[in-house]
Image (cartoon, rainbow, N blue to C red):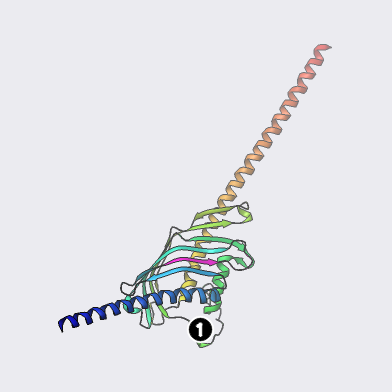
């Protein structure tokens, strides 16, 4: 009897482990499928995700290989590429009405900043998110387009305590930068206390806020490098002008010296 009871307990434990593993695997695959299915519809750009690994027990996990493509009309294929982003969630909130995300850390994202039809590529994607979510992060006085209740706030409620984006790189390309691609650091981004109220925020709204900050950082990087390019161009122009003036002055002096020499030689012959 005792042996039978032990066997039953072992079977129950194994089934529990298998069940938890199945739930975790289905959850991770569901997140991946959801991102790749609804992401392109919302952002109106290609979007792929290599994988998701979230533990229900610890609440920690990661998102690997997220690539956000560019809108139509831009030359470069991708706007943002994330190698790895770590996420920490309060495990008890996963099945509640509002998921509490303690931390999102994105390390070394690759951002491409490109001008094209309708502004820069990041701004275009941000506008697509705003159009879907309703409202704008840039114009709070403009009334949001009325949407059906089912579309007004899609997705589960979130509370995000901290977002940190560090070690990023921005690839810049524009005619004003000499038509060449320049890679420069993306300023560190820190956000906190998002969705603290009872309504929280949705994943789309979170993406909109994060993308807005990335866009601001990319614009700052671009303007800083544009100023440097302007200074370098001015130095080059000044150097060329100085060389031209020096050469012209030298030519005039040489001709004057030669003419004076010829004049003196002529007088000596007389």
Residue furthest out toward the left:
2
**Number of numbered discs on residues:** 1
Q: Residue 66 lies in magenta, yes or no? A: yes
Q: Secondary structure at mark 1?
A: helix
Q: Is residue 256 above or below residue 155?
A: above
Percent x, y of residue 39:
52, 74
The structure residue drawn at horizontal position 61% and vertical position 62%, both measured from the top left corner, is: 115
The structure residue drawn at horizontal position 51% and vertical position 84%, both measured from the top left corner, is: 151
Percent x, y of residue 124:
58, 69
Residue furthest out toward the top:
269
Residue sitting nearer the eye, 11 or 204: 11
Q: Residue 86 lies in magenta, yes or no? A: no
Mark 1 Cα within 10 Å, few/some/many (few <14, many 20+)? few
Percent x, y of residue 107:
42, 61
Q: Is residue 53 above or below residue 1?
A: above
Percent x, y of residue 25:
39, 75
Image quadrant containing the C terminus? top right
Image quadrant containing the N terminus? bottom left
Q: Which residue is mark 1?
A: 152
The structure residue drawn at horizontal position 19% and vertical position 82%, both measured from the top left corner, is: 4
Residue furthest out toward the right:
270
Quadrant of the rendered image containing residue 5: bottom left
Left or right: 36, with 103 as reference point: right
Q: Which residues are magenta?
A: 63-76
Residue sitting nearer the eye, 24 or 120: 24
The structure residue drawn at horizontal position 50% and vertical position 84%, both measured from the top left corner, is: 152
């Amino acid at each position: 009897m005792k042996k039978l009871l032990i066997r039953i307990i072992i079977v129950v434990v194994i089934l529990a482990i298998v069940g938890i593993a199945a739930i975790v695997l289905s959850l991770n695959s569901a997140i991946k499928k959801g991102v790749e299915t609804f992401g392109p519809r919302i952002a109106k750009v290609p979007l792929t995700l290599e994988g998701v690994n979230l533990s229900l027990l610890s609440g920690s996990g990661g998102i690997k290989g997220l690539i956000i493509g560019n809108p139509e009309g831009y030359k470069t294929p991708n706007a943002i590429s994330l190698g790895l982003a770590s996420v920490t969630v309060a495990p008890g909130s996963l099945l509640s009405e509002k998921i509490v995300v303690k931390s999102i850390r994105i390390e070394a994202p690759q951002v491409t900043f490109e001008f094209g039809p309708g502004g820069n590529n990041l701004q275009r994607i941000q506008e697509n998110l705003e159009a879907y979510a309703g409202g704008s992060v840039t114009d709070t006085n403009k009334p949001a387009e009325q949407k059906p209740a089912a579309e007004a706030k899609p997705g589960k409620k979130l509370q995000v305590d901290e977002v940190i984006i560090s070690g990023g790189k921005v690839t810049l390309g524009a005619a004003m930068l000499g038509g060449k691609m320049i890679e420069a650091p993306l300023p560190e981004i820190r956000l906190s206390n998002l969705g603290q109220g009872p309504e929280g925020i949705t994943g789309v709204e979170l993406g909109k806020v994060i993308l807005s900050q990335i866009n601001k950082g990319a614009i700052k990087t671009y303007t800083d490098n544009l100023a440097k390019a302007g200074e370098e161009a001015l130095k080059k122009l000044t150097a060329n002008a100085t060389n031209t003036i020096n050469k012209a002055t030298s030519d005039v002096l040489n001709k004057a010296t030669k003419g004076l020499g010829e004049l003196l030689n002529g007088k000596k012959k007389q």
